[in-house]
Image: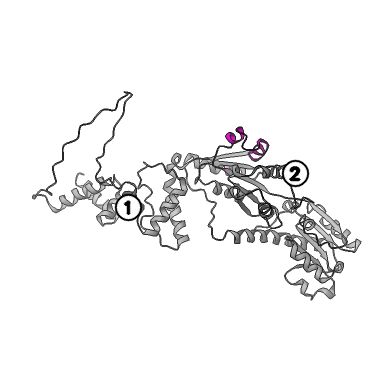
Amino acid sequence: MKLLTERQFLTFSVLVISQQPEVQVQFIHALSGLVSGLDTISNPQDDSQLLALYDLIILDVNACQPHEVTQIASCFEGEILLLLSEKDFKSDLVQGRYYLLPPLNEHQIQQAVKPALQRLIETQKYTVLTQTLDQYHQTTIVGHSDKTTSLKQQIMQYAPSKAPVLIEGEAGTGKELAARAIHEASGRVGPFVMVNCADIHSDSVATERLFHHGGSLRLANHGTLFLDGIENIPADFQHILVQLLEGRTVQSHGGSSSYLIDVRLISASTKGMTNIVRENGFCRELYERLSVLKMNISPLRDRLSDLRELFPYLTRRLCKQLSLPIPTWLNEYDFYQGKYNWPGNVREVINLIEKCLVINKSPNDYWHEYMIPSSQYASKMMINVSHHSEIPEFSPSRTPTPMRGYPSDWSLQEIEKSHILKVVDFYDGNKSAAARQLGISRKTLDRKYKEWQSEFD
């Protein structure tokens, strides 16, 4: 469990409810400078909008009736710390709650408040985890190409800042992965909460889902809010984000009050946001605030060397998810021989691996069977077109003489060697695929090549 630092406690607000002035003064002295906001009132108020302004309520049970404690607990999303007397110690109100007993001192108050706020953060994380339990999230950026190495450096450079980040890139390149990596490296104690902007509509239901007491924005407090597909956010929601970025405050539902929020915003788009802004399709002020820091994730076709690590990594991850054994073709990342640009990016690679795992077919066999089914009949021809305006014509080649088998005077070893070389050539030098077609191991095939090489040494 990641413990809160002294600096991180300064992002929380506390409300003390007590009818005893001397108790209120004790809490003010103990918590001033430890938390960002500290208010005191004498009587409890069943006002969910007022309570939403605070992360922790310190409630003197002598200031209210038992049923009022239950009412406050039912409408408050934060933590409650009870101030008890000796006679209240065995009350049912104590069950599952933090509490304090007199006499009070500054150290005792601080030692009670800190774990209560720590539990608030852990509760938020658990809520987010249960909402996304069916998804497997990773924060590991795999690959060592120049572009991927540069991306990793950029993530570590951006992580410590609170400044908003705009991530652009094609669909399937890993924008959410980069956002999660920034969050993990930032050290923020709150959770990573993702919002699909395409699901946000201009209605009260969407407002409630984002801004009510248990909404996405509130859950992301002290953490990161990831706005995926930011170009889809409605115009009337854009001014709310401007307000959030300006004052770190959010208007409560109904507009009667506002509450402080400590959220880092990371947004992502598959489109060039500058063009959308130029065409008046997005608020320029909001764009400038969201793009204080920018990064662009390159498509897979510009970093194909990453497949050397990415392919076995994704295969192992999917095997774990699907509870399947690691396949023998784990390292066959070169089955496409670098001639395919992966228009679907990393997501397409994942889909291919998952499909091959489910149907129990190696990527190489799947590739030759479904992607290039006519390859075994097609002639291999490379045409270098010059700057002339016309492509040269080729006359049909004459029908090749049918093969009549190997010469009768060849030895068995010569026939075996010829056949193996033909299969390897058919698979464009991919020895793993050739070995599988021949029904032998790759190790056996390599041994054959060494034996043939030794014949000439």
Q: Amino acid at mark 1?
A: Asp
Residue 259: % across, % down: 76, 51
- Residue 415, compared with residue 295, is above or below; it is below
Q: Which residue is at a point 77% across and 68% down the rendered structure image? A: 70
Look at the image and say whether residue 288 sits in the magenta stretch.
Answer: yes
User: Can residue 222 be seen from the camera position used here?
Assistant: no
431 lies left or right of 134: left
User: Where does label 2 land, which residue?
Assistant: 247
User: Can residue 208 be seen from the camera position used here?
Assistant: yes
438 lies left or right of 303: left
- Residue 107, compared with residue 386, is above or below; it is below
Look at the image and say whether residue 197 sits in the magenta stretch.
Answer: no
Task: Point out the stretch of residues depicted in magenta.
Answer: 269-291
- Residue 187, compared with residue 149, is above or below; it is below
Q: Name the foreground residue: 250 vs 162.
A: 250
Q: Mark on residue 365?
A: 1
Q: Name the foreground residue: 405 vs 272.
A: 272
Secondary structure under the numbered disc 2 in the rendered image = helix
Way the structure is coloured: one colour
107 lies left or right of 125: right
329 lies left or right of 285: left
Residue 64: % across, % down: 85, 68
Residue lying furthest front: 203
Report how far apart the C-alphas of labels 1 and 2 lie in the structure: 58 Å
Residue 264: % across, % down: 66, 47
Q: Which residue is at a point 41% across and 53% down the rendered structure image? A: 353
Secondary structure under the numbered disc 1 in the rendered image = helix
